[in-house]
Image (spheres, rainbow, N blue to C red):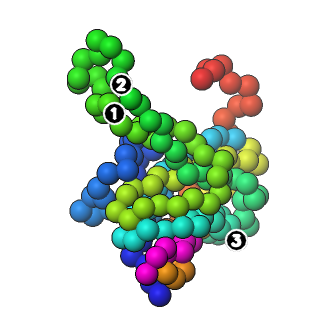
Amino acid sequence: MKLLLLLFVVDPHVKVFQDFQPPANPQKIIDVVCARNEFEPAQFVLRPGTDLRDVTVEIGPLRHEQTGKTLPPGSVRWNFVGYVPITRNTPDTPADRLVRQAPCRIPDVLLADRRISVKANTSQPVWLTFRIPADALPGQYRGKVTVRAVAAGARAGKSEVSLPIKLTVWPFAVPDERHLFV
């Protein structure tokens, strides 16, 4: 049984609230560009048409297009994005400076949970962290991220949906010693 489950890519600088609506023509490929020895984020969103349980994510191997070599396991980590309840906004903050008016739930924390439930017609972001080894071959890598879930209730059934990953690794490395601490 196929579940109605939409996956789409969102810029990692965008806060994805649970009522976030997919664009008319959503981006359907995770496209990341980075140097060797660098961290780079990406974000995609799952939006089910039915309540889901046991939602989990799997990152397949990232394979170099020319040589077939893969990046080591753990080169891409994933986390569900959790929501922080906000009961009131910071006093005296101008309305145009607020991300959202309280009360609300702000997407912020990266959860350690590897399985979650997602309500129908809500958006659930998934954060990806790419860590490219210093000795990675430069060039194009391809892979995919797969979301697996079980529909809850009367529409019970398993499903999986995937998004392709395109990773470009530049032929230079970021130095080990960094001077900007965040």
At label 3, the amino acid type is Gly
Q: Which residue is mark 1?
A: 103
Q: Which residue is mark 3?
A: 68
> In whole angstroms, how far apart are the C-alphas of marks 1 and 3?
50 Å
Q: Earlier in the sequence, mark 1 or mark 2?
A: 2
At label 1, the amino acid type is Pro
Q: Residue at x 75, y 59 (%)?
A: 73
Q: Which residue is mark 2?
A: 88
Q: Is residue 83 visible?
A: yes
Q: Residue furthest top?
A: 92
Residue 134 counted in the magenta span: no
Q: Are marks 1 and 2 in contact (CB under 8 Å)?
A: yes
Q: Residue at x 39, y 71 (%)?
A: 50
Q: Are marks 1 and 3 in contact (CB under 8 Å)?
A: no
Quadrant of the image occupied by residue 90: top left
- Residues in magenta, as a range: 148-154
At label 2, the amino acid type is Arg
